[in-house]
Amino acid sequence: MTSTTKHETQIVSDPDVPIVRIIREFDAPPAKVYRAHTDPELVAQWMGPDSTQTRIDQWDCRTGGSWRYTAIHEGQEYGFYGSFHELRPDELIVQTFTFEGMPDGVALEKLVLEDIGGGRTRLTATSLVDSFEGRDGFVASGMDVGVNEGYAKLDELLARG
């Protein structure tokens, strides 16, 4: 299925709880969107901004497994790691997310994949951070660029099948 529609990514910070919620639709069924989030070869192709290369260092994609990847930007390397807490094929991923540069700033992430018909999926990613300062730093770090550019690459990847 070739995508000709550009979908808007909503990034919302909750005023009462240190949560960031990302909502995005994809022109692919939940099974393909899920696979693109759990297959390390696919993750490396779309994760992060265009100016960054992603190297998967470790990937044990199962409930109780863990992951680590390195983002490479202009010769600098930035490590990220976490654990998979719950995986339900084609519908749910619950994981932790930590940037090695801020090891105390662990986020708990829940990605819900909703079949919205017509071979399309709505992804709702909710990240709970330990403080409002941590959440605001997360958002101010340019996260929106990485999310938007990454999801545009994911659109292309899903369109190729």
Image (tube, helix red, strand yellow):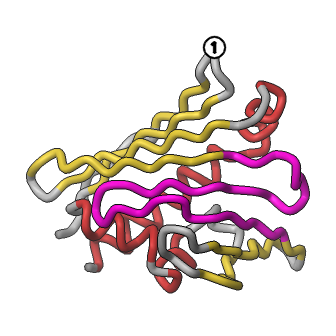
Q: Position of residue 62 (x, y in %)?
A: 48, 74
Q: Is residue 142 above or below residue 151?
A: above
Category of crowding for the residue at label 1, using alpha-carbon neighbours closer than 10 angstroms: few (below 14), some (14–19), many (at least 20) = few
Instruction: Identify the residue shown where x is 70% and y is 75%.
Output: 69
- In the displayed image of the protein, which residue is found farthest to the front? 64
Tell me which segment is drawn in magenta: 78-107
Assign the N terminus to one quadrant of the image: bottom left
Assign the C terminus to one quadrant of the image: bottom left
In the image shown, does 62 or 138 lie closer to the viewer? 62
Instruction: Identify the residue shown where x is 64% and y is 62%.
Output: 49
Q: Is residue 53 above or below residue 93?
A: below
Instruction: Identify the residue shown where x is 60% and y is 33%.
Output: 20
- The question of residue 103 being in magenta is answered with yes
In the image shown, does 60 or 75 lie closer to the viewer? 60
Q: Position of residue 122 (x, y in %)?
A: 30, 46
Instruction: Identify the residue shown where x is 29% and y is 79%.
Output: 160
Q: Position of residue 59 (x, y in %)?
A: 60, 81
Horizontally, is 156 left or right of 45 in the view? Answer: left
SS at circle 1: loop
Q: Is residue 13 above or below residue 81?
A: above
The residue at which mark 1 appears reads as 16
For the residue marked with disc 1, what is the amino acid?
A: Asp
Q: Position of residue 121 (x, y in %)?
A: 25, 52
Horizontally, is 145 left or right of 123 in the view? Answer: right
Q: Is residue 129 above or below residue 44?
A: above
Q: Predominant secondary structure in magenta? A: strand
